[in-house]
Image (cartoon, rainbow, N blue to C red):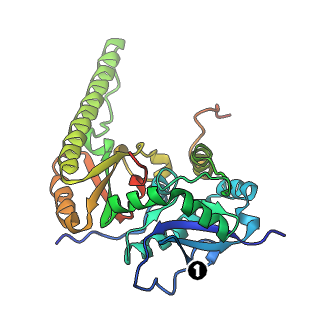
Amino acid sequence: MTVVERREVALVDLLDRLLAGGVVIAGDLTLRIADVDLVRIDLNALISSVNDKVPSPWEERP
Amino acid sequence: MTSGLRYVYAVCRPFDAALQSQLSGVAGVPPKLLSHHGLIAVLSEVPGHDFEEEALKARLEDLDWLSATARAHQGVIDALTTVTTPLPLRLGTVFRDDSGVRTMIEAREDEFRRTLDRLEGRVEWGVKVYLDAGDAAPERPAAKPASGRDYLLQRRMRTRSNEEMWQNAETFARGLHDSLSGRAEDFRMHAPQNSALSGAAGRNVMNAAYLVPRGESEEFVELVDRTKDDTPGLRVELTGPWAPYSFTGEE
């Protein structure tokens, strides 16, 4: 049997599943977190975290 | 002051085994089970100041918080997969109180049962293909072009070898996907990951998820292992087994 190395799960792999997968429930009693918002939030969070190292593609560097 | 809200991780069928006792859930609150109409909602009572709609939006922009919450969510789902096949809900599914959770179960119980039947005993494997540009086309310190014509020639050769690399990568990924999807019940293609975000070396050209019966996982993993070192310059990465996150939607 091949032993699969169980390294720590990478955050991006996790977010692929937790933010793009899973049952989406948007009933009256939930707080209605739209999936579109979540995807944008996920990117915002990740992009701002790497901003120091990675120049934004939308801005000219001074 | 808002009272506790209900953060729901998953819906599943009743199970006999006890859930891991040391499990700390989202916001550090151990999960509990809410049984209704023959289904179980797995939830934590979380503080309103972090999980009210506006607060949650702000919190999700905080990478440390998002990361801790995602890992706590995953921890609970992982523990559930050892005792049952859970139907994971999307991160950040929050209800005002237990009766909101019950109403949701009533509204969707048929759908939950159908999906739980379909996913029973299945796990998800993630397979990513990376193009290691560095290996496939070593950056030779190009000789200084003697003329404009030399320069254009060098550039054209570089472009061509890039194109070849892409074509090889695409052919490899397609072949791998054909053989893996032959062994899987279903698959999903996720968007390739940005290497700046993942921190992984190389360029992600395929990011797929496969739904595989737990009992056939060993063969599936061996199949990935066998094909993995076939082509220089390409790297295959396997993750899992995951709960079937990518397959919770009805066709």
Q: Amino acid at mark 1?
A: Pro
Dot 1 surroundings within 10 Å: few (below 14), some, or many (20 or more)? Answer: some
Is disc 1 placed on a helix, strand or loop? loop
Q: Is residue B239 visible?
A: no
Q: Quadrant of the C terminus of chain B?
A: top left
**Residue B237 in the image, given as x and y percentages of width and height:** 30, 56
The residue that appears at 42% across and 58% down in the rendered structure is B245
Q: Quadrant of residue B204?
A: top left
Q: Quadrant of residue B213?
A: bottom left
The part of the image, by quadrant, that contains residue A54 is top right
In the rendering, at what x and y percent does residue B146 appear? 33, 18
The chain letter for the residue carrying disc 1 is B
Outermost residue on the right side: it is B1
Residue B58: give x, y in percent of width and height: 72, 55
Observer-nearest residue: A59 or B197?
B197
Q: Nearer the viewer, residue B128 or B22?
A: B22
Q: Is residue B204 above or below residue B38?
A: above
Q: Which residue is drawn at the image coordinates 32% and 31% (left, top)?
A: B142
In the displayed structure image, the side of residue A33 where residue B139 appears, left or right: left
Counting from the top left corner in percent of width and height, residue A32 is at: 66, 51
* Residue assigned mark 1: B30
B48 sits left or right of B81 in the view: right
- Residue placed farthest to the top in the image? B149
